[in-house]
Amino acid sequence: MNWYEFLLRNRGEVFERTLEHIGLVGASMAISLLIGLPLGVALVTRTKLQSWVIGAANVVQTIPSLALFGFLIPVPWIGGVGASTAIVALSLYALLPILRNTCTGIAEVDPAVIESARGMGMTPWQVLWQVQLPLAAPVLLAGIRVATAMCIGITTIAAAIGAGGLGVFIFRGLAMVNNQVILAGAIPAACLAIAADSGLGYFQRSSARR
Amino acid sequence: MSSLSDGFQDGYALEFRATTYRLPSGAPLISGLNLSVARGETLVLLGRSGSGKTTTLKLINRLLEPTEGEILIAGRPSGSWDPIQLRRGIGYVIQDAGLFPHWTVERNVGLVPRLERWPTERIQARVREMLSLVGLPPEEFAQRRPSELSGGQKQRVGVARALAADPPILLMDEPFAALDPITRADLQKEFQALALRLRKTIVFVTHDVREALFLGTRIALLDHGRLVGVYAPAEFLKATEPEIHAFAASLEFGGAHEGAQ
C-alpha cells in the first residue's frame, strides 16, 4: 500500500489529525505572540535585560524537543500527558524568533523618524503603534514566519506525549516499521509548513512594500 | 488645556536662564546659557559640531530637560508645560526631514492636525495649502511616498509638516545641510521669504556662516556649550572674538569649502 492510498483510505483520521496539528500550532503561536510581542517591545530600550531574556530563550532552543516534552510531563499545573503540555513547550520554542525579531525590528527603525515623531508631539503610545510597529512589521513578520514553520515541524514530535496531530502517523509508522505510514504523517505536515511559510511570506513582502 | 498660542501675547517667546544640561556622566553639553528670543525673530544658533546647538533646540521642545537653570516658553517655565501639548505648538524640522516612510506626503503633513483631531476636510484643505506654500503642487505630490522624493522635496515636506498646525514657534536643526549647494540656496531664499511672511519665532541651527548671515535676524555663537555672544548679522564679521575669526576664515574659502560638509 502506497502512502497516498493510506491517506485516501484513512482520510477521516488524516483530516482530524491535520486539524489537531493546526490547533496545536495555532494555540502555541497565539500564546507565544501574546507573550513575545509585548515583552519584545518592553525590552527594546533595556538592552542589558534584553540580552538576558534572549539568552534564556536561546537556551530553550538548544533543548532537544523530545527531551523538553519529557521534562514538562512531571511539572505540576502545566505538565502531564496531552495537548496542554505540548502547547507550553511549543510556545517556548516559538518565543525566541518572535522576541528577537521584535527587538531588532523596532531597534532598526531610523532614529531620525522616532525623534521627529516625538518632537512633533506624538505620545509614546502613538509613536509605538503608528510609527515603530508599522515600520518594524517586515522584520516582525519574518520572525513569526520562522517560528510558525518551526512550530509545525516540532508539533509532529508532540504526538510522543499524547498531544495528537500528524505525528501520530509518524510514530505509528515507526512502530509498524512501515515507511508509507510515516510518509502519511510527514508529507501533510511538510505541506502545512510550506503553505504557512508562503502565506506569511506574502504578508511579509506586502508589508515591506508599504 | 492651555495651548502655546494662548500665552503668546507679549514678552519674549523663549528665554534661557542660566541653563545647563549635563550628560548622566556629569559632562556639560550646555553651560550657563542666558539667551532670549524675541517673538517673530529668526535666531540662528551657529557653532561647530559638538558646540551644543542641537542640545539647545531639544531643551526647548523638552526632548531633553535642563539639569540646572530654566527655560521660559511664552513666559512659563518649560517644565510647567505638558510636553505633548508643548511640542504640538512647536514646529520641528530636522536634517534628514524625519518623514515617516510608510505614510504618504499628505499623511505626513497632516500629522499634527490629526493628532489634534481636526475634522478631516479641514486637515485636507490645510495639507493642500501647506504643500502649495512650500512649492509642491498637491495634485502631484500629495499621494507620493517619501522614498519618491528628492532631498530638497523631502525638506520642503518637512517644513510643510512643521507649519501645518500653525505653531507660533519653529525649531530647525540644520534642515538644509544635507542638500546640494544649488538646491540649498533655493530653499534658503524661499525659506527667508516664508519666514518674513509668517512672522513665526524661529530658532535655526546651522554650522554654515553664510546661511546664518543670510537667514538670521540675530546670530548666537556657541562654542563648547557656552554662548560666545549674540550679534546682528552686520556686526558679526566685525566682532573681535577669536571664535568668530575661525568662522570668518571659513567664508574666504567660499563655495569650495561648502561642498565638503
Image: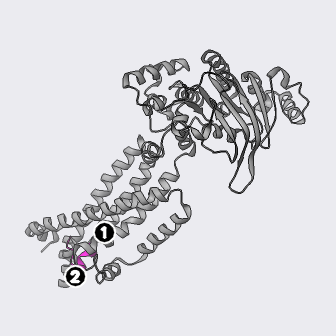
Front residue of B194/A26: it is B194
Question: Residue A69: x, y in percent?
Answer: 31, 78
In the picture, the disc for residue B6 is none
Please name which of the two marks, 2 or 1, marks the residue nearer to the observer: 1
Q: Is residue A70 toward the left or the right of residue B172 in the image?
A: left
Q: Secondary structure at mark 1?
A: helix
Tag 1: Cα neighbours inside 10 Å, few (<14), some, or many (≥20)?
A: some
Residue A34 in sight in this render? yes
In the picture, the disc for residue A174 is 2
For image coordinates 13% across by 66% down, the residue present is A16
For image coordinates 54% across by 25% down, the residue present is B6
Q: Chain of mark 1?
A: A
> Considering only order in the chain, which callout, 1 or 2, is on the residue closer to the N terminus?
1
Front residue of A76/A184: it is A76
Three-letter amino acid code at the position of disc 2: Leu
Q: Is residue B223 above or below residue B14?
A: below
Q: Is residue B166 toward the left or the right of residue B72 in the image?
A: left
Q: Main structural element of the magenta stretch: helix, strand or loop? A: helix
Q: Which residue is mark 1?
A: A153
For image coordinates 91% across by 30% down, the residue present is B240
Q: Is residue B48 above or below residue A148?
A: above
Residue A161 among magenta residues: yes
Question: Residue B25: x, y in percent?
Answer: 71, 57
| Magenta highlight range | A156-165
The alpha-carbon separation of the residues under discs 2 and 1 comes to: 17 Å
Q: Secondary structure at mark 2?
A: helix
Count of numbered marks: 2
Question: Residue A67: x, y in percent?
Answer: 34, 81
Residue A191 among magenta residues: no
Front residue of A45/A154: it is A45
Q: Quadrant of the N terminus of chain A?
A: bottom left
Q: Is residue B23 toward the left or the right of residue B112 in the image?
A: right
